[in-house]
Amino acid sequence: MNQAPDCPSPATTTRPGEHFDAHLAQPVFFCAPSRLVIADGAIRQAAPLLAAQGWRHALLVTDRFFSQSSPWVKALVDSLSLNGISVRVFDDGEPDPTVTLCDQATRELSPDLQANPFDHVIALGGGSNIDLAKALCLTLALQCPIRELVGQSRWPKEPLPLVAIPTTAGTGSEITPGTILVDPASPTKVAVMGNGLRPKIALIDPELTYSCPPRVTADAGIDALTHAIESLITKDGKDFDTGLDPDPGYSGRNALTMPLALQAIQWIFKALPVAMEHPHDPQARRMLAYASVYAALSYGSAGLHAVHGLAYALAGVTHDTHGSTNAVFLPYVMDALLEERAEELGWIAQAGSVSVAAGAAPAAPSQAAALVRDLIAKVGLRTNLREFGIQAGQLGQLIEQGLAVTRLAKAYPAAGVNEAYARIVNAAFHGTLTG
Ligand SMILES: NC(=O)c1ccc[n+]([C@@H]2O[C@H](COP(=O)([O-])OP(=O)(O)OC[C@H]3O[C@@H](n4cnc5c(N)ncnc54)[C@H](O)[C@@H]3O)[C@@H](O)[C@H]2O)c1
């Protein structure tokens, strides 16, 4: 997208290198896995690293693609065994796991727990397998249905330690404190969140993402872009309501989270179109893997708001993928925050316009949302609610259910959240941007 000749110049008032100076007074409460490994071929380092923790009995949570159509499960099991670790493989993972699947798996795996107690859980797969594994870390330890734990952030027993090996570059679940599950009895996805649920080890191997089908690459890439943008423009740490929790999962943006988010945005604009066309391009896959981690380190402390709240409500109605339900709201949330977050939108516009044409003049903040929407369309995702089959009569329900995810609605960084959600949903329905 080229800048129109009469566009105002970006509202960036800081010089490069000074972008985050004004945020140094924001409080930081940063949580991350205690070990973060990123390397081509890193999966081969997993077994010795786990053995070095003193662990001897693993539960490996994955799905049939990985156990039947990839070499990784067999290679991992062999290498764990060589390192003195026995493994029970659970390969019934599914996209968007439900509370029902989690409870069935808990029942199926509990007898193993008596015979040979697992001392850690390994998740291999996309966000879905990682989230199922996270939930199992809790339910196997506590021996209760997962629904009983929704809304709690601390538990009478520690969850089993989790090692997350993501095979998509997007969700960041290998870094974050939450598991997101579908509950057939609830109109939106439900979450169990607490810092104790963060994986102990996140092992990121970009080579594992080469086999992602284009649609999975697109969904995950736009999910990571959403994490980065939402956390870059979320509430400041000093204004964030942690409910006086001494160990909060999310606590607002600050001078540590914001640079991570901006770097992730720059990498995604650059690498996502390349990875879509050339799935085996090592540098594009590395860039997306890094971007996903950086975005997750950012949002995993700063938190998210309207895009995710509304995406959970839409997924409750249409059951579409997480990446696609985020994608359809992201440009309209950015557009709604044009006044409050002009400077950050200027940085995003600059990242987007430079990625479209080398040497292009930086676009204005008002063009950031359109640049993001162009990227979403370019990778084949839908850009308005009508394309999801949503009717005008369903908009009220989306607004209401989005607002009902109060932990996200309260982080919306502007006054008048009810009216803002209504404006965003209407704009997403008609596909209208003001910028
Ligand atoms: N807990 C969190 O912090 C968090 C954050 C964002 C999203 N999520 C959740 O993550 C889920 C989406 O995860 P996702 O986008 O990673 O997709 P996914 O895990 O749902 O996987 C989608 C499909 O892609 C396949 N797949 C994954 N990696 C592959 C590979 N390398 N090669 C071939 N096929 C592969 C899977 O087998 C699956 O069939 C949603 O349920 C969402 O709610 C959780």
Image (cartoon, grey):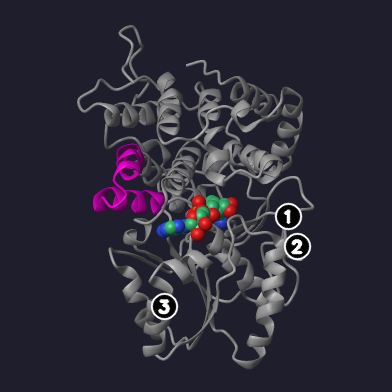
Q: Secondary structure at mark 3?
A: helix
In the rendered image, which quarter is residue 400 located in? top right
Q: Is residue 263 above or below residue 45?
A: above
The reply to whether dot 2 and dot 1 touch (C-beta < 8 Å) is yes
The residue wearing badge 1 is 183
Which amino acid does the dot numbered 2 rest on? Arg
Residue 419 shown in magenta: no
- The tag earlier along the polypeptide, 3 or 1, is 3
Density class for disc 2 (Cα within 10 Å; few <14, some 14-19, many ≥20) is some
Q: Are marks 3 and 1 in contact (CB under 8 Å)?
A: no
Classified by dominant secondary structure, the portion drawn in magenta counts as helix
Amino acid identity at mark 1: Asp
Q: Which residue is mark 3?
A: 74
Seen at 40% across and 31% down, the residue is 378
Q: Residues within 10 Å of mark 1 (few under 14, many from 20)?
A: some
Instruction: Where is residue 174? Give x, y as percent.
Output: 48, 61
Instruction: Please state which of the two labelled residues, at mark 2 or mark 3, is closer to the viewer.
Output: 3
Foreground pick, 24 / 428:
428
- Percent position of residue 102, x then y: 68, 67
Position of 346 compared to 315: left or right? left
Q: Position of residue 404 (x, y in %)?
A: 74, 41
- Bounds of the magenta segment: 266-294
Which marked residue is nearer to the observer: mark 3 or mark 1?
A: 3
Count all numbered tags in the image, as a single digit. 3
